[in-house]
Image (spheres, rainbow, N blue to C red):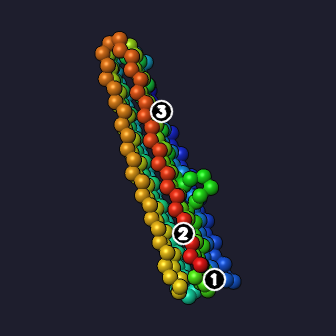
Amino acid sequence: MYRGIFVSLAIAIVISSAALGDIGQSQFSFDRLDNNVTMLGGIGGGSSAGFVMTNKQETATDINWTFATQNQFVGLGQAANAGGVGAVITAGGWIQAGNLDGIPQRQQVSNDSADKTQGQSLGLGAATSISKTGGPGGADVKQVGVLCQSQTSSNPYGVATESCGIVAAQKAETVGAAGSSINVSSGVSAQSVQSQWVN
């Protein structure tokens, strides 16, 4: 028996003011994978796997060579396996990534002054767990996340750019003889926040 859940949320907003010629952009994303494998005795095994990838880009241009672009990529993958003879095994985990709450990827660029403001955030969290009792058996859980984002804005007064990347991976594994009781858990968390302003 296995269960997999995938949730993806992406919101993009582009604002351009015709009166002032300024450029404003903002985008937000959230991705999550859940994977679980459960074995309740008997002879056999099970596996579950999932993968999600989101890639977003916003680009805007305006008068006076005013330009703004921002990109964001998230790739998440996970797999869980369990097998045994008379064993009771639960193996699984979750991994999620995206912009931190309240801190989307955003840009504001003026075409008639040096003003440029940029900000972005990335966060990744993951957890795995395995429990085994009863007969002989084993399980493993693997997860990996790759995140990157970049921003560039320019106007007649200069250029501003920033970028960030996060790579994380984790693995939990257990094998036990009859009568053994094993519990394994692990977690990982990473966050990044960047901001720029030019006046």
At a point 39% along the width and 47% down the height, the residue shown is: 168
Depth-wise, is mark 3 or mark 2 nearer the camera? Answer: 2
- The residue type indicated by label 3 comes to Arg
At a point 49% along the width and 51% down the height, the residue shown is: 191
Can you identify the residue that label 1 sits on?
21
- The residue type indicated by label 2 comes to Gln
The CA span between labels 1 and 2 is: 21 Å
Q: Quadrant of the N terminus?
A: top left
**Element type at marker 3?**
strand
Q: Eyeballing the image, is 90 above or below 19?
A: above
In the rendered structure, are the residues bearing label 3 and label 1 in contact, judged by CB atoms less than 8 Å apart? no
Tell me which numbered mark, 1 or 2, is placed earlier along the sequence.
1
Nearer the observer, 191 or 182? 191
Tell me which numbered mark, 3 or 2, is placed earlier along the sequence.
3
The CA span between labels 3 and 1 is: 50 Å
Residue 196's mark? 2
Coordinates of residue 77 in the picture (x, y in percent): 40, 45
The CA span between labels 3 and 2 is: 42 Å
**Element type at marker 1?**
loop
Direction from residue 105 to residue 140 in the image, left or right = left
Q: Quadrant of residue 139?
A: top left
Coordinates of residue 88 in the picture (x, y in percent): 41, 18
Q: Eyeballing the image, is 113 above or below 195?
A: below
Can you identify the residue that label 3 sits on?
3
Q: Quadrant of the C terminus?
A: bottom right
Query: Can see residue 86?
Result: no
How many residues crowd mark 3 within 10 Å: few (<14), some (14–19), many (20+)? few
Tell me which numbered mark, 3 or 1, is placed earlier along the sequence.
3
Q: Quadrant of residue 169?
A: top left
In the rendered structure, are the residues bearing label 3 and label 2 in contact, judged by CB atoms less than 8 Å apart? no
Direction from residue 151 to residue 48 in the image, left or right = left
At a point 34% along the width and 30% down the height, the residue shown is: 173
